[in-house]
Amino acid sequence: MSRDETRSWAECEIDKANRVADEARRIIEDSQLRMKRLCVVLNSTTSINQLPDELLVEILRYVHPGTSNLDLKQLIRATHVCQRWRVIALNAPLLWAAIRFDIHHRTRRIDAAEMCMQRSRDALLHVNIDQDAFNLAMRLLYAEDHRIASLRLESRTGKYELSRIAPRLNSMTILDTLEMTIRSFRSEVGLYLPSQCSQLRRIWMENVRLRVSTPLTSLNRLELSTPVEDLAGWLSLMKNCPNLEFLSLEQTRLSLQPPAFEPEDSSDEGRVHRRQVMCNLRTLKLRLDLDCMSVIFQRMVFPQTTRITLTVNSVSRIPSVVASTIAVVRQMSTFDTLVSSTQSMHVMGMLDIKLYAWSTPDGSGEPLLRLTVPNLPTRPGQTALAMRQITEPLASSPLTFLSLDPTWNDGLDAPTYLELLCRYPLLQELRVIHEYSVFPVLAALRGTVATSGGVVCVELKILRIVPLDLVETAKEVLDLLQYRSMRGSRLRELHFIGSHESIVDAAVKEQLRGLVDVFGFSDGGNSLFYWQLYHHFAPCKLPFAGAEQSKRALFE
């Protein structure tokens, strides 16, 4: 062929090849589109994709429940599961409303913050700011103040951050929660809340002195901690928060001096101040010097309080801190009602005395009453006196569960425990966690009383103990079971914690099994056993994060 014929033939063949390629591409695109549609159909048959979009959004909110960047990464991974999940997630502003500004992996974190702000659209923002990213956060949030519903700030000294954040509070018109943590104890840092913050519902301040210019009628939760007591400020603040439901005041640094408190009106020092009634308060937590607690109970009344946590800081000038604390507790207007509903109690002590009382037999959840008293006397006779003083207020409670962990090696004998147990005739379960208390408690259970047929705790059905010497303890328990069975007070369950049954003689085990319905040994997995080990090894600073870690830490 000539040159022109060759050129014409080649162009014709190229046109044919292009038409074939176009047809192939069309077939491939149609096939891909069909495959995508088939995948959508196949994906829709899975159980989770049978759920409506709104419910799937609620499930994804559990993937990213807070302001953790780790949770944010998991949420982003969830958007790559399938097209439906991605479309739903990107069109759900609530999923991206929690934003954390942090210095770690700075570029990635800042990009993530900007991404969340864009995807959150008009949703309310929940912002967490670390000091290292404070300036950038303030710049990015400048036009978004009206969307911030909760703000948490962490800082080393706080002076610079608080000076800049205070004016911005005026523009945060829907701010609901305000949390600030200052790590330094050396500098005095204060925050003055403007009147525009009257809509706040929750405030949590650590090492920050708080002042308000207008009553916070919407506030229902207030948590404050300062290095030194701020009694006058606290009382003034409580008066401006009449609808509080949860109140926590903590003095983080111990003081050997009595609190310097001046009356509000120095001209009326001799006059009895009118006590303010906190009608809605349900939970009260105080970690203060005893004098501060006394002033608060003298100036405030809490008629609806159902949960009390009192931790007494060291006060050197009070001779009997236990008795004084009990006197302060009894100032509570609802104390008798609280005691009458308590069915479960834990009594512990090492360098201090701790008393926890629950309303349910299993002792789960927050206790109704939590009392911690320091400076336990170590002189002979003082320990028993302190135990009597701290348990006496609950003598009228219908107690069915009692856990004893008095980690003192002396001072508590059988007569002391007998006196204690006689206060609770309805007791059904008894746990003795400290091994040095086992033999005195067993001796007390064999004592006699004037009522209930002469048997101590005639309703007792369950006994759990941590024995010091398993062989000797088994013999003592055997005698106790036989003694109580003969007097019509038979135990149903017996458990040895932190022991192995191979140590006990087979004949003794058979006798024990014949006297109770349930008889068992625990190798130490019980949390109470590890709590007891913690008391002994606390000076070693071992990491007691869980049972398995505790085992490794102890035996390594």
Image: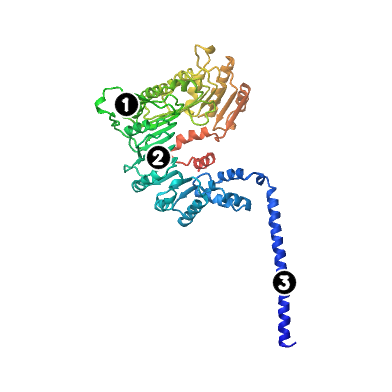
Of label 3 and label 1, which has the lower sequence position? 3
In terms of secondary structure, where does tag 2 sit? helix
Tell me the distance, in whole angstroms, between the alpha carbons under discs 2 and 1: 41 Å
Tell me the distance, in whole angstroms, between the alpha carbons under discs 2 and 3: 71 Å
Looking at the image, which residue is at 58% across and 25% down?
A: 494
Quick check: can you spot residue 82?
no
Task: Check residue 488 in the rendering and tell me which mark sits there, or answer none.
Answer: none
For the residue pair 353 and 61, the one nearer the viewer reads as 61
Of label 2 and label 1, which has the lower sequence position? 2
In terms of secondary structure, where does tag 1 sit? loop
Tell me the distance, in whole angstroms, between the alpha carbons under discs 3 and 1: 101 Å
Residue 361: x %, y % from top left: 54, 25
Looking at the image, which residue is at 45% across and 50% down?
A: 101
The residue labelled by disc 1 is 318
Residue 281 placement, left or right of 27: left
Mark 3 neighbour class, 10 Å CA radius: few under 14, some 14 to 19, many 20 or more:
few
The residue labelled by disc 2 is 197
Label count reads 3
Mark 2 neighbour class, 10 Å CA radius: few under 14, some 14 to 19, many 20 or more:
many
- Amino acid type shown at disc 1: Ile
- Amino acid type shown at disc 2: Cys
Asked whether the residues under the numbered discs 2 and 3 touch, taking CB atoms below 8 Å apart as contact, a structural biologist would say: no
Position of residue 82 relative to residue 354, above or below, is below
Looking at the image, which residue is at 55% across and 17% down?
A: 458
- Which residue ends up furthest to the right in the rendered image? 1
Of label 2 and label 3, which has the lower sequence position? 3
Residue 172 placement, left or right of 73: left
The residue labelled by disc 3 is 19
- Amino acid type shown at disc 3: Arg
Residue 487: x %, y % from top left: 57, 14
